[in-house]
Image: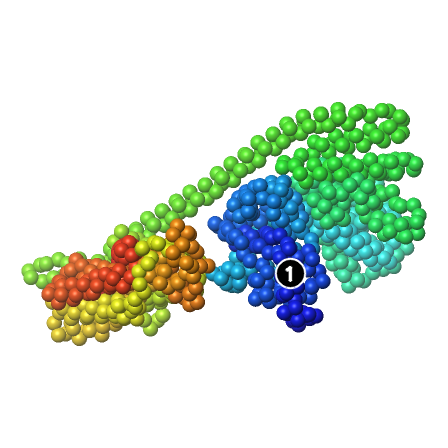
Amino acid sequence: MSSPVICLNDKYFKVQLNGILSAMHTLFLLYEHASGYALFSTKQFEDVGKFLPQVEGSVLDFGKFSTLVQLYAYEKFTDAAEALNNCNAISEGLMHKDLLNFLANSLPGGSESREKLGVGDPRLGQAICEQFPNVKCLQTDAVPEILRGIRYHFTSYLKKMSQQNEFITQLGLAHSFSRGKVQLNVNRVDNMIIQAVGLIDQLEKDCNKFVMRIREWYSCHFPELIKIVPDQYAYCRCVKYIGDRNNLTEEMLHDLTEIVGDEEKAVEILNASRSSMGMEISAMDLMNINHFCDCVINMLDYRKQMQNYLNDRMECCAPNLAVVVGDQIGARLISQAGSLSNLAKYPASTIQILGAEKALFRALKKKGNTPKYGLLFHSPFISRASSKNKGKISRFLANKCAIASRLDYFSDIPVNTFGNYLKSQIEERLKLFDSGEIPRKNIEVMHEAVSEAKLQEHTALKHLKKQLKAEKKAKAAIIASCEESFNNGTQDSISMENDFLEDANFEQIDVSGETKKKKKKSRNSMESMEIDEMKNGIPFHTEDDAITTFLLKMALLLRPSHLNSSNWVCILYAIFDIGFSATVGYLCYKFFNGLIPTRERTFYCEDASISKPFMENTVSVKMLLCVSIGLPLMLCLLHELVAFSKLENANRLQWRMISSEGLRKVCINFTRIVVKYLFGFLLTIVLMLVGKSWFGVLRPHFLAVCKPGIDWHRCEGVALSLQNCTQTDMHALLSARHSFPSGHASAAIYSVTFLLFYLLSLRARKSVNLNNFDRISLSLYALWCVFVCVSRVTDCWHHVTDVVGGSAMGFAVAWLIFNRYEISTFVN
């Protein structure tokens, strides 16, 4: 894109422009963005027309444009719903209360302001003038050009908003706004009427063409049938039924009478077949004619079906218009107008000539008489009127169509009551033209129509409520049946599990020092033994035993042939857990990239809580991650190996038999522990990032990082914002606003709590007792975590409340992870 041509040099332009702007008053400009309202201040550009190339250059260059246009005030929308409400109000030219409050608080003088305000929408400017009578709204001159520059450089004014965030905000609002526009009542969608009437017209043309082809084809064999049966549908059925005319006998008269609907015509067809002048026809030709007749009959049936569908759609969408001019003409009027809303906006004179546009423009071009009717010509009222009264009745009919279409479009529950009374008025007008009978007054007719329409709307509303209640009952019945089937399925799974367990049980009977084992045989015993084997390899919660059995059966169906049952289920659990961890890691990455914007807070220079000096971290992030992840997992691996090595009652032969399988279980179990631990660790990080962005608490050394460019002797009691900061490192400035909760504290407390719960679970299972090594290692690691938490306060990186909040969050996540899943998966 080529840069604009500058006729004058920049120095001369700036001198002339500053001289012009110095004599002007301040001009405020309102800019509506998807994220909120912004008010900009500038000088009026009324006398800068001769410098238009330079003005365009300054619009494209932010350095020049920012010297002329400054951001005066900005108010952000609290949520997407508020943004959508404001967008809907602005699109309709209305003034939302949020915009009213923003202008009252931002404009100098408030509601009594006498400033000049530039807006982009004239309707919005008129609404603003009604609320602020002393404000003069401008939409012309250089205002559009300045608003274009503001729109182009808006993200540069708001440094915390990137172009990607702006695009996401605009896209979300656009989707919500468009969704609200297209969410209409599906029963009153006029687009279906337009498509249906278009399809009916096309079917009409195709059916006429195809029936003519059949008549020409079959008339070579039986030409007399055309005059006897003029109806298209009946003719095609007769051709299909008769076939070769020489085979038509008196026994076929009954069926032929049903086709043509008249016994005399059936007899006439029989007599004509005996004396027909047509030639003979071969079986091959007759077979092709029959196939073609089948296609045409199906097409004619479909045309009737589409006509019935059109009648139903018109009754739901435009019942009054359908009563006045009929379904076909009413649908064609809607199709010609484009929609029912467009038809409701048309005056009666436009509706009168809809469909006769070519004749209208030809008459205007040749300066002749304009047409009196278009699509309304096919109405029976026009054909019933005399030649001299056709124009009058056409105009009267168009007037009633306009009223009917507006009633249909703007009524919440459209009923055909008004259509019946409008049709009766047209009948009375025809009688006036024919016999001179004076019709009733319009006000009397409308009073009767309104009273009857209220009763009909009340009845329709009751029917609608009953229909909604029936739908709710049907949904409740479906939900109840689903719950019942689920409960039945649970009971069935429990009974199946008991059957499987009973089939796999061994009865031990001691007789004279010898043990005899009796095994119950069953066709499901092998599957039950595999399920028991998997249960022995992996511990599950006993209260979920029925669901566990069902999951194990599904795992058996999906198991590869080269893996045993327990290893396969462990692999499935590991895959599931890794997927969860990957998802949490992806969310963590998104939060790091600014998915949640940090809340902006004002601050004061005399605030002692944020006036601490900046110091480096005693415990770096890398050191924290290495210790918090590496040390607990090493201790878990050590205890799993010790638990495996201390098998009770295991001799050398048993050790050799189970050592290979046991070691594989230890590896899989430790993998699950790692996955669960990392899942909780990542969850802690995500919650920490969400809290930091949501609360936006300033760190104790915030002022040292911000470096506000103000006079420290005169700033007492003055609320400052990020715009007063002179810090150029945006990452450091963003980090200085992320104080609560403490990430170091949450990670450290999570790791030590997880390790404590893990060791206690081993003691509860009597796999490993807590010895001195466990107590010493756990105590030393707890002291390390306390040191990490205390260092965050002494290094002036966090407040005490930040450390307490982070510690509580880490403890809560560890408790949740440990109590939701079984961690130690080794069983003796």
Q: Is residue 574 above or below residue 75?
A: below
Q: Quadrant of the N terminus?
A: bottom right
* Residue at 58%, 49% in the rendered image: 87
50, 803: nearer the viewer: 50
Q: Which residue is labeled 1 in the image?
A: 19
* Residue at 44%, 44% in the rendered image: 479
The answer to whether any part of residue 427 appears in the image is yes
Q: Quadrant of the C terminus?
A: bottom left
Per the image, label 1 sits on a secondary structure element best described as helix
Label 1 crowd bin: few (<14), some (14–19), many (20+), radius 10 Å: few
Residue extending farthest left:
512
Question: Residue type at mark 1?
Answer: Gly
655, 621: nearer the viewer: 621
* Color style of the picture: rainbow
Residue 188 percent coordinates (x, y): 64, 43
The number of discs equals 1
Q: Which image quadrant is residue 722 in?
A: bottom left
* Residue at 59%, 33% in the rendered image: 461
Judge from the rendering whether residue 30 lies leftward or rightward of residue 273; answer left or right.
Answer: left
Residue 269 percent coordinates (x, y): 84, 47
* Residue at 93%, 49% in the rendered image: 367
Judge from the rendering whether residue 649 lies leftward or rightward of residue 383; answer left or right.
Answer: left
797, 402: nearer the viewer: 797
Judge from the rendering whether residue 391 lies leftward or rightward of residue 486; answer left or right.
Answer: right
The answer to whether any part of residue 588 appears in the image is no
Q: Is residue 786 above or below residue 136?
A: below
Q: Which image quadrant is residue 126 in?
A: top right
Residue 718 percent coordinates (x, y): 41, 52
Q: Is residue 312 above or below residue 6?
A: above
